[in-house]
Image (cartoon, coloured by chain):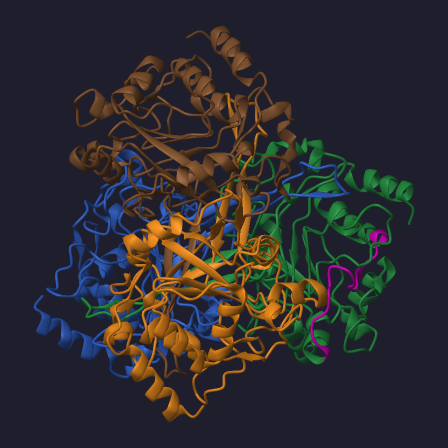
Chain colours: A brown, B orange, C green, D blue
Amino acid sequence: MTRDEFDALFERLRRDRLPGLPGRTQRVVAAGLVRTGEVVAMGRPWDSVPGPDNRRPALHLMTELADVTPPEPTVHKDFLASDFHGKSQTHLDALCHIAYRGLLFAGVPAREVVSSRGACYGAVTDLLPGLVGRGVLLDVARLRGRAWLEPGEAVEGPELLACAERQGSPLLPGDILLLRTGHLARRRSLGAWDADGLSAGLHPGAMHVLHESRASALGGDGDSDVRPSPVPGVHSPIHVLAVTAMGLPLIDNMDLEALAETCARTGRWEFLFLAAPLNIPHGTGSPVNPLALF
Amino acid sequence: MTRDEFDALFERLRRDRLPGLPGRTQRVVAAGLVRTGEVVAMGRPWDSVPGPDNRRPALHLMTELADVTPPEPTVHKDFLASDFHGKSQTHLDALCHIAYRGLLFAGVPAREVVSSRGACYGAVTDLLPGLVGRGVLLDVARLRGRAWLEPGEAVEGPELLACAERQGSPLLPGDILLLRTGHLARRRSLGAWDADGLSAGLHPGAMHVLHESRASALGGDGDSDVRPSPVPGVHSPIHVLAVTAMGLPLIDNMDLEALAETCARTGRWEFLFLAAPLNIPHGTGSPVNPLALF
Amino acid sequence: MTRDEFDALFERLRRDRLPGLPGRTQRVVAAGLVRTGEVVAMGRPWDSVPGPDNRRPALHLMTELADVTPPEPTVHKDFLASDFHGKSQTHLDALCHIAYRGLLFAGVPAREVVSSRGACYGAVTDLLPGLVGRGVLLDVARLRGRAWLEPGEAVEGPELLACAERQGSPLLPGDILLLRTGHLARRRSLGAWDADGLSAGLHPGAMHVLHESRASALGGDGDSDVRPSPVPGVHSPIHVLAVTAMGLPLIDNMDLEALAETCARTGRWEFLFLAAPLNIPHGTGSPVNPLALF
Amino acid sequence: MTRDEFDALFERLRRDRLPGLPGRTQRVVAAGLVRTGEVVAMGRPWDSVPGPDNRRPALHLMTELADVTPPEPTVHKDFLASDFHGKSQTHLDALCHIAYRGLLFAGVPAREVVSSRGACYGAVTDLLPGLVGRGVLLDVARLRGRAWLEPGEAVEGPELLACAERQGSPLLPGDILLLRTGHLARRRSLGAWDADGLSAGLHPGAMHVLHESRASALGGDGDSDVRPSPVPGVHSPIHVLAVTAMGLPLIDNMDLEALAETCARTGRWEFLFLAAPLNIPHGTGSPVNPLALF
């Protein structure tokens, strides 16, 4: 895809967009998907060990232990720190996270995000009510009959539609779509690699599907972008189209393996999806532990 | 309450306890409470300003901005750090957080929590599927017809039962109970005070009610403990009874004001409650942003 | 002092300036001041307790203890974190720390300091060889015969010269000058106050003295600025004149009490001064523990 | 060396030891070594990039920039965080850092270091006056006529003495001895390796030399220990003997390359050595930037 084609796509996708969490009716319908009470968590463990795909490890330190003659009770505490947008944890990207040509979503200037105050537009606090709605797993690896897609493989729009159809889970407005490439299955089998350089993910053209189905959010077991980028000069085109053009929050680095197993076992690829970002004023996103409730 | 009485209570409450999140059936029933799709978030803003009730402020730093000639897109990032068990944010206490007489829940030695590895028993990862079930707001301030309870006022068991009854929300097994003392209403009106020294909360005897109703978790707009403690030599008796005797996770420092307003407006004090801790291996708890879905 | 007068002063002071650590000859001469081998440390304790003059406390956490059956030896470790430019510790300001009218020292644009890379001009690493030279304590509180200057009291240039003369320590090129207002003596007697709003320090006009004596650095028990600022619209005029006009590193929040006592006892207000910033690439300064060697 | 031999050595070395910084006379003599005023800094850059020898990278984040319409001046700030005992920076080990058989230096129980308060014995604040005295570089790589020692190569006591003699720098009481193995020269040529597993350093028997010469501190371009350890069951025997038996602070991860070049060029391997730890109450050590002044 040329840069001009990408820019034309950007313009088409951003037209008439309202950023949108699922609406009330969509949430009620999604709650109706709960039938067995089974829950699957999708948050990956905080990763404090450096590696080829973890250049900025999270910190988790024990800070207080029951090691002095105590008043009762004794209390154990820890300390967390992270640059959460890296690969060290599952996290949500708020709308202020990505700017294209100097502009955030809705054409707001990027300078609304400043070092001393954080984001004055598009902060994660806009998402405080959480992403709560119908979740649909698009298990493209399974559709292809493979354990995983190889890093660098792109997923195009027709395949997303075929996947939804084959699974019996047609896309509906407000859906939170989860793309499974089998990233973690591959990582567990073959070890980590530099996923910032090479990863399976969506081709930019596929965002038409999310636009037309009026999805409200996109998550993935990678970060949704195919890498290397098919668009010269744009390193994360899916991030640009989803966040900056369409106003869709992204959820990166999800663990979709247990979810895929549950969907396959139960024959249901739709569920009540729940992800509540932490309340971080002026923040650009949040670590999360998304849940699927069946 | 004397220390001996407290210890006898501890023994009674810990007998025959299984730590327990709501079960599958309870979750399905709770999902059935969703009727309007309204969502209320209960996570307080990360508080990075020191104050009388915030001795260990959270950190939120902007770390990357679009301030160099960029490749596209430009990306905004931030950094989070916190000793989350303090008052700087809404958080979940896992079972390893509290030890009494050198023992964790189920009599496990406190030395299972070590500085170099964290918690080897009762870690927050035991709660990864989240607290998902029927939530009930026990709005004791409203019951008393007051904007808030004064710091130091205790709530006893019969009042909890009366509150549930008056609200038409009888306590059921698996419930996640939320105690509203009006802490934040008072803080907003009168300013912060040292809530570690003086706060409204439960009298230890009230834990009988949670034991008998088989609640699965307890949250509050304070930290559930009345302070100063009514038990000599035990600074947080509710924490001891809930976490260490009964195996109930606690959620501290919730913002229950919007929830109380919604409950009063709709006449419903029960809802689908959702709180998913971050996936922190060996951690003692997690910051959370709990949601109520009506 | 009007803003125009300040700007004129800024222009005069910045003319013909080279940023300058003490030179080799000055260091040799300074080493010759060592006669008794007595050492006085001037670094204040890392302050992790919030207070009126410590809005961003430093963090010091124990992270590893000998609490598991160990291989030998057992090792104790800790973790440090700080936004060191605050009041929580003694620190050095590098030249990139302060910009006036969008310009750093020598007219370099402030945009040379960027979030993603840090300082590309004037970083603390320019000061790696440390501030090593003749130190002179200018004990203005003692000169006035008082335990401390009251917050808000300004020190003018003639008083600096009178102080140096009275002490028998005339100012020489390359000197590292330390201004004692008795800040810590007052803090220890009367408790902390908001020193960002009200503190004793230099009047901007006094910087003429440092310019003419060709001082190489300036330190103080406050942050050298009198507050409130005597210059409308410029909140830290001494920082601007020292760092941005003259290229002088500043050392803020020093403990000069023991040094003052030693100077008075020995009758010597000059010594070998040593302060070595940490090697922080692209950093804007560093915590330090300066030493005086007699 | 068997474990029994090691334990016997431990007992011999710890007999009659006083922990000791250089005394006043030694400092005065050391200051007399300053002749040219040349300064060499030995602090390695804070390393925030993970690698085989940097498992716990330091953090350096820009936190405030001149990116809003400002009051004057605009201020640039950053944030530092580190678990400094790792390989990410040059640091000092205080006496509380290492315990052997449950005991710190002077037989003090290791339980004097606790999570909630830090070190109540042997804290880095005992070293606040800094390590200031005669430094001697023992350039063993140069003595062997090689660019570096290979990882795993041990240096024995006689070689230390031969090195000092060849350099014309006999060991004197109170000396701060710096062992150069060429670690950084090798790292720069061949890349990083896992130095915790394999590194050149001292054989435990060599500590006799430091005992007899009454050295006051030991530094190195590694961490002074040869690895793998020649003592079964003791992973860092030099740390045990230096810190726990003899009360000698250690300085790990120094950059000795520029120092070695200066020593060779000037023909002088002795200098005024200066290292001032930060004032961290109850801390186990400190990042430092040591200086050599010629």
Q: Is residue A254 left or right of residue D68?
A: left
**Residue B122 placed where, x, y %?**
28, 64
Give how far across and how far down residue A30 sits, in percent.
40, 37
In-image side of D283 versus C99 (left or right): left
Does residue C193 show up magenta in the picture?
Answer: yes
Is B245 located above or below residue D142 in the figure? below
**Which residue is painted at 77% across and 64% down in the image?**
C199
Q: Residue drawn at (20%, 57%), measured in percent from left and top?
A: D159
Q: For this rendering, which residue is in front, A42 or C103? A: A42
Rendered location of residue B222, percent (x, y) = 54, 68
- Residue at x 76% of width, y 51% of height: C236
Q: Is residue D272 visible?
A: no
Task: Indicate whether A11 appears above or below D146.
Answer: above
Asked if residue C89 shows in the view, the reply is yes
Quadrant of image for the C terminus of chain C: bottom right
Q: Is residue A161 left or right of residue D3?
A: right
In the rendered image, which quarter is residue C27 located in?
bottom right
Q: Nearer the viewer, residue C251 or B180?
A: B180
Dominant secondary-structure state across the stretch colored magenta: loop
Residue D66: horizontal and vertical position, in percent?
A: 67, 38
Q: How many dots with numbers?
A: 0
What range of the chain is rendered magenta? C190-205
- Residue drawn at (28%, 84%), measured in percent from left and top? D16
Q: Is residue D204 magenta?
A: no
Instruction: Between residue D289 and residue B178, name the one nearer to us.
Output: B178
Quarter of the image for residue D105 reads bottom left
